[in-house]
Image (cartoon, helix red, strand yellow):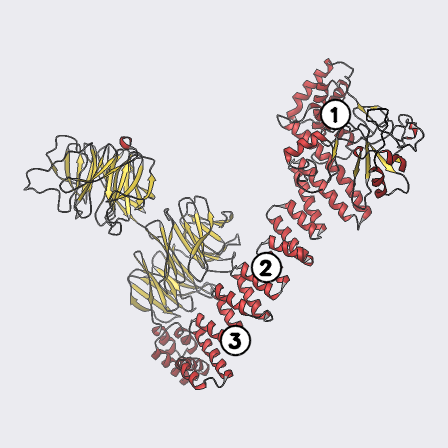
């Protein structure tokens, strides 16, 4: 829609209402206390009508005029409220009155009220404008606009119809077009707007400086006149542009601004698509239809058999573009010099910027995702662009602007119409001008014949074959397509297919004895006599091959009509001949474009493969599944064809049923994988494990493509592709470290360690070393994640003691190698702060001194300098903050250069994986000859208790003569500072003395050995995760499980069985 201002007039009073004379020649206006009669052509005031002593708010014509000059008075009737608007029905029998109290009163010609409509808002929503729809299809529909900012529709009976619309402004006027297809409205938004008859807003006709109090549409035209509060009257002409798209014999065009109609120009079959919004652009290509709406682009797909388009994709973005084309998987937007290629997901994949304005663009076909575009520019350049190539290819450079373009079927010739309406035809390879013709406004090559094109101009349709003279015939409109013998012509808003006999160009070739070319033209469509003339001429010209084709075709056309006689002749005596006859009849039906009849004949003749091919090509899935169910499972070839067609038609269920009937499990697995029906594939693998690799490898690749890398790693692992599983995990770990997701990094390192342990059964030494390394890294990154959050985030969920323990653990276990992402500055700074809080001033002073040796980030400089000064005011002795070894009871320094071991007995400390406090656990080893199974059986025996004491205590078996023989309570004999670690080894008698609740066992899978730990403080409840074997204080572990619903270290779900 493009509005053009035709005239403007100003009067001294506010214009409240206006109305056109039924013939459209004059306008009456309510301006103040005056009624003015104006000329509709230019707005000139013809005469004023007097007789009103107060302001005139509304005027209207009856069908037979305003009022009769002979009538001396006007009939008057009292109403309950002030009247703001009025409108006559189409037949002039009823008058609708809109009132200030929110009531619509419908009265007959005598003023008697017949219907009363009360709006919900009452007096708060005065009725300011009403109008009857003049369309016969929507007979007696009343549009009501009130100052509740609503637009409603009612029937003459008072029943509300259609959907009520919210306007977001106070409407002052409403008017229908003569045929009732559009509504014009204006009001407090100072605009005149165009709506559909259902109330859908289409656009703005004009914007003004004051409220629009009235607007009317000139009868039987596209002229709109409006009057404003400042006394200004405007007249606009609305030009409704044609929005359409054409691909071969499919034509899509906009109807009533909000609908799209797809028309098959051959069969004249129509399909209406209701969009309920303004349709701005349309593009059609093969089975794709793109519809641009104000805030999105809908991509519709046709199944190629029923012509039923359904929305398959939406690009929910607002675009401003001059031209729009669609390809198999992309949408191309053109805005001035810029071309943008978008996927159906709305992702911009490519962009081309031209040297001049784009005047013409057309899709010239190609493989999916590699289609070619033909582009004509204002500076005369003609380009070819492939949507998978960022570089345009220049075909030609003309001196004048390009108006229309087309390329021949073989991509060898290019036809161009320039701005002087000259048709130029070039050889693309040599750039040679082959010929030119004047008076052309559009051009198209025949899609079925290389050397034929047609162009239109000056009211003529011109057909040109090769270098022969042009054949002309009269035509209205202009030509937009040429397919076989049909030429598609657009006249105003109507598209039609014109059947053009190809006799003239055929005889042009025939005169030159070019029989093969003449035969190609004849195949497009000529009369029977022309066909016979060509056959005779070819025979006389000794072109026997062409003559044979012509004669044979004519013979078959005549002879194939006698099938019924042939059947009667053959009868039932010769089944073989009857079958052959049916097959030939099916061949004829297939050539005659009667595929359903041909398929049924092939079935009756037992030619299942041919029937299946025809049915599959036309997408008749129901017919195809009937055949598949009737076939025996031993007929594998036709069943395989059925399954293939079901896959192509995306009927997964039918294809699965067919493969199951065949017993082809591998094809069934492949089907589930290709269609992404993973649950069915997994179910099949459970029954047939030999297909594990065929399912889990593509499943893992699909997960990786969809950014689900953790699941992909597990799938690779299930498929036995350990290298790919490790690579995915390594990449995930690297990404987590780079992105400062240290908790995830710790988790991925733990998964890597478990992956290595799984592989260690084959590569024992190397993988076990990697297992130990990854386990160590996993714990370091897990610990550092809490420290990093403490230093970088304003609040921390950890207690000061926890941060204190985490920092000490990390510093005790960091090697000289620098680990990516782990900051020693952050760790020392956190330790210094928490040491001050807990009274460990010597450790805080040490931390600040170490920080002075490191490069400090600018964000921490001030805090560290302040802390370094403040620590000098603190005492030189520490509070009672120490770390005790539970084996030898030695107090250990808070930072230990030897690592996480006791400085006296060298016993490794066991930490809680939540608070990183030292747990009262001591690891012990089995004596020689004791297996894991025997140890478990000994520990599980009932523990003896003494009767003399009610206290729980760790006791040894009666076989032990002295308590000193208990390795856990024996006095340590080595000196502090020694380098030899003496592990605790237990005998069978000691194992029998242990309580099962005091022993924790890490049951590592082979080739690792089980690890045994004994709690020296039974009152301290300790829980071990059955997956990662990390130890926790039981209360901490339960809280963490409730918070995360999984183990915080290995992320094992709470409901996963042990």
User: Where is residue 1018 shown, x and y percent of the image?
Assistant: 79, 28
Residues under labels 1 and 3: Cα distance? Answer: 92 Å
Q: Is residue 6 visible?
A: no
| Residue extending furthest toward the front | 947
| The one of 454 and 34 positioned closer to us in this rendering | 34
Label at residue 697: none
User: Where is residue 648 shown, x and y percent of the image?
Assistant: 53, 61
Vertical relation: 819 (above or below) 138? above
Label at residue 606: 3
Q: Quadrant of residue 5?
A: top left
Q: Depth-wise, is mark 3 or mark 2 nearer the camera? A: 3
Residues under labels 3 and 2: Cα distance? Answer: 28 Å
Q: Quadrant of residue 425?
A: bottom left
Vertical relation: 693 (above or below) 985? below
Residues under labels 2 and 1: Cα distance? Answer: 64 Å
| The one of 303 and 847 positioned closer to us in this rendering | 303
Within 10 Å of disc 1 (Cα), the crowding (few <14, some 14-19, many 20+) is: few
Secondary element under disc 1, as helix, strand or loop, is loop
* Residue underneath mark 1: 853
* Quadrant occupied by the C terminus: top right
Q: Depth-wise, is mark 1 or mark 3 nearer the camera? A: 3
User: Where is residue 21 shown, x and y percent of the image?
Assistant: 16, 45
Dot 1 or dot 3, earlier in sequence:
3
Within 10 Å of disc 3 (Cα), the crowding (few <14, some 14-19, many 20+) is: some
Secondary element under disc 3, as helix, strand or loop, is loop
Dot 3 or dot 2, earlier in sequence:
3
Vertical relation: 517 (above or below) 995? below
| The one of 224 and 1017 positioned closer to us in this rendering | 1017
Count of numbered circles on the image: 3
* Residue underneath mark 2: 671
């Amino acid at each position: 829609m493009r509005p053009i201002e035709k005239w403007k007039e100003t009067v001294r009073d506010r214009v409240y209402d206006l109305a056109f004379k039924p013939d459209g020649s004059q306008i009456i206006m309510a301006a103040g206390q005056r009624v003015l009669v104006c000329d509709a052509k230019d707005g000139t005031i013809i005469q004023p009508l007097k007789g009103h002593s107060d302001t005139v708010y509304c005027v209207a014509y009856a069908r037979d005029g305003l009022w009769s000059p002979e009538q001396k008075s006007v009939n008057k009737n009292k109403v309950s409220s002030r009247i703001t608007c009025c409108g006559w029905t189409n037949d002039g029998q009823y008058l609708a009155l809109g009132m200030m109290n929110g009531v619509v009163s419908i009265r007959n010609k005598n003023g008697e009220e017949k219907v009363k409509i009360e709006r919900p808002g009452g007096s708060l929503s005065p009725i300011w404008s009403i109008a009857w729809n003049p369309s016969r299809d929507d007979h007696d529909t009343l549009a009501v606009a009130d100052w509740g900012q609503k637009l409603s529709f009612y029937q003459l009976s008072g029943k509300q119809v259609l959907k009520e619309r919210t306007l977001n402004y106070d409407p002052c006027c409403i008017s229908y077009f003569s045929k009732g297809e559009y509504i014009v409205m204006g009001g407090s938004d100072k605009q005149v707007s165009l709506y559909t008859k259902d109330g859908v807003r289409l656009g703005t006709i004009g914007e003004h400086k004051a409220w629009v109090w009235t607007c009317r549409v000139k009868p039987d035209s596209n002229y709109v006149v409006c009057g404003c509060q400042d006394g200004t009257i405007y007249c606009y002409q609305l030009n409704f542009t044609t929005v359409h798209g054409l691909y071969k014999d499919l034509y899509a065009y906009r109807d009533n601004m909000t609908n799209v109609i797809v028309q098959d120009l051959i069969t004249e079959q129509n399909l209406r698509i209701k969009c309920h919004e303004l349709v701005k652009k349309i593009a059609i290509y093969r089975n794709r239809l793109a519809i641009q709406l104000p805030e999105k682009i809908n991509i519709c797909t046709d199944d190629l058999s029923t012509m039923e388009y359904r929305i398959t994709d939406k690009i929910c973005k607002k675009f401003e573009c001059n031209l729009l084309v669609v390809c198999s998987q992309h949408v191309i937007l053109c805005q001035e010099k810029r071309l943008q290629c978008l996927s159906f997901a709305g992702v911009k994949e490519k962009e081309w910027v031209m040297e001049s304005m784009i005047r013409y663009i057309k899709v010239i076909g190609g493989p999916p995702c590699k289609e070619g575009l033909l582009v004509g520019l204002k500076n005369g350049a003609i380009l070819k662009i492939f949507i998978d190539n960022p570089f345009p290819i220049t075909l030609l450079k003309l001196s004048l602007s390009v108006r229309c373009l087309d390329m021949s079927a073989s991509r060898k010739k290019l036809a161009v119409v320039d701005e002087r309406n000259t048709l130029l035809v070039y050889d693309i390879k040599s750039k040679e001008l082959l010929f030119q013709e004047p008076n052309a406004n559009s051009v198209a090559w025949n899609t079925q014949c290389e050397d034929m094109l047609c162009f239109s101009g000056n009211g003529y349709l011109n057909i040109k074959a090769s270098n022969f003279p042009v054949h002309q015939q009269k035509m209205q409109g202009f030509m937009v397509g040429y397919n076989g013998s049909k030429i598609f012509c657009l006249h105003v808003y109507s598209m039609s297919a014109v059947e053009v006999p190809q006799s003239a160009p055929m005889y042009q070739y025939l005169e030159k004895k070019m029989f093969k070319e003449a035969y190609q033209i004849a195949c497009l469509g000529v009369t029977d006599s022309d066909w016979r003339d060509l056959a005779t001429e070819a025979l006389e010209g000794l072109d026997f091959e062409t003559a044979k084709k012509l004669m044979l075709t004519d013979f078959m056309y005549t002879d194939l009509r006698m099938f019924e006689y042939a059947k009667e002749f053959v009868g039932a005596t010769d089944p073989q001949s009857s079958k052959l006859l049916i097959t030939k009849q099916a061949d004829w039906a297939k050539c005659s474009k009667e595929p359903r009849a041909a398929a049924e004949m092939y079935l009756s003749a037992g030619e299942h493969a041919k029937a299946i091919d025809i049915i599959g090509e036309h997408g008749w899935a129901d017919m195809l599944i009937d055949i598949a169910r009737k076939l025996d499972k031993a007929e594998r070839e036709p069943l395989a064809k059925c399954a293939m067609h079901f896959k192509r038609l995306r009927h997964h269920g039918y294809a699965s049923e067919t493969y199951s009937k065949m017993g082809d499990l591998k094809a069934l697995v492949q089907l589930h994988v290709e269609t992404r029906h993973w649950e069915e594939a997994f179910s099949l693998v459970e029954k047939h494990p030999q297909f594990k690799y065929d399912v889990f490898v593509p499943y893992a690749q699909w997960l990786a493509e969809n950014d689900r890398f953790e699941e992909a790693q597990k799938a690779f692992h299930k498929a036995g592709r350990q290298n790919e599983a490790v690579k995915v995990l390594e990449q995930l770990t690297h990404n987590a470290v780079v992105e400062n997701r240290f908790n995830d990094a710790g988790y991925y390192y733990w998964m890597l360690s478990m992956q290595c342990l799984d592989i260690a059964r084959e590569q024992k030494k190397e993988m076990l070393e990697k297992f130990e390394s990854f386990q160590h890294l996993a714990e370091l990154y897990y610990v550092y994640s809490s420290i990093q959050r403490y230093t970088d985030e304003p609040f921390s969920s950890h207690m000061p003691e926890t941060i204190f323990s985490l920092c000490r653990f990390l510093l005790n276990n960091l090697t000289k190698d620098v680990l990516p992402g782990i900051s020693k500055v952050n760790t020392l700074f956190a330790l210094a702060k928490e040491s001050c809080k807990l009274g460990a001033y010597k450790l805080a002073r040490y931390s600040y001194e170490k920080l002075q040796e490191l490069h400090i980030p600018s964000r921490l400089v001030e805090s560290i300098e302040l802390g370094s000064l403040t620590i000098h005011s603190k005492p030189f002795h520490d509070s009672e903050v120490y770390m005790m070894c539970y084996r030898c009871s030695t107090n250990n320094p808070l930072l230990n250069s030897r690592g996480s071991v006791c400085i006296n007995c060298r016993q490794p400390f066991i930490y809680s994986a939540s608070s990183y406090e030292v747990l009262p656990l001591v690891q012990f080893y089995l004596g020689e000859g004791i297996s894991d199974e025997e140890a478990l059986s000994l520990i599980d025996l009932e523990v003896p208790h003494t009767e003399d004491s009610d206290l729980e205590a760790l006791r040894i078996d009666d076989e032990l003569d002295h308590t000193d023989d208990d390795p856990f309570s024996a006095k340590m004999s080595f000196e502090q500072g020694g380098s030899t670690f003496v592990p605790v080894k237990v005998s069978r008698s000691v194992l029998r003395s242990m309580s099962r609740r005091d022993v924790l066992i890490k049951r590592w899978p082979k080739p690792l050995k089980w690890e045994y730990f004994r709690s020296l403080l039974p009152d301290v409840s300790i829980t071990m995760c059955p997956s990662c074997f990390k130890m926790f204080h039981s209360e901490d572990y339960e809280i963490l499980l409730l918070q995360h619903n999984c183990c915080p270290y290995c992320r094992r779900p709470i409901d996963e069985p042990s």
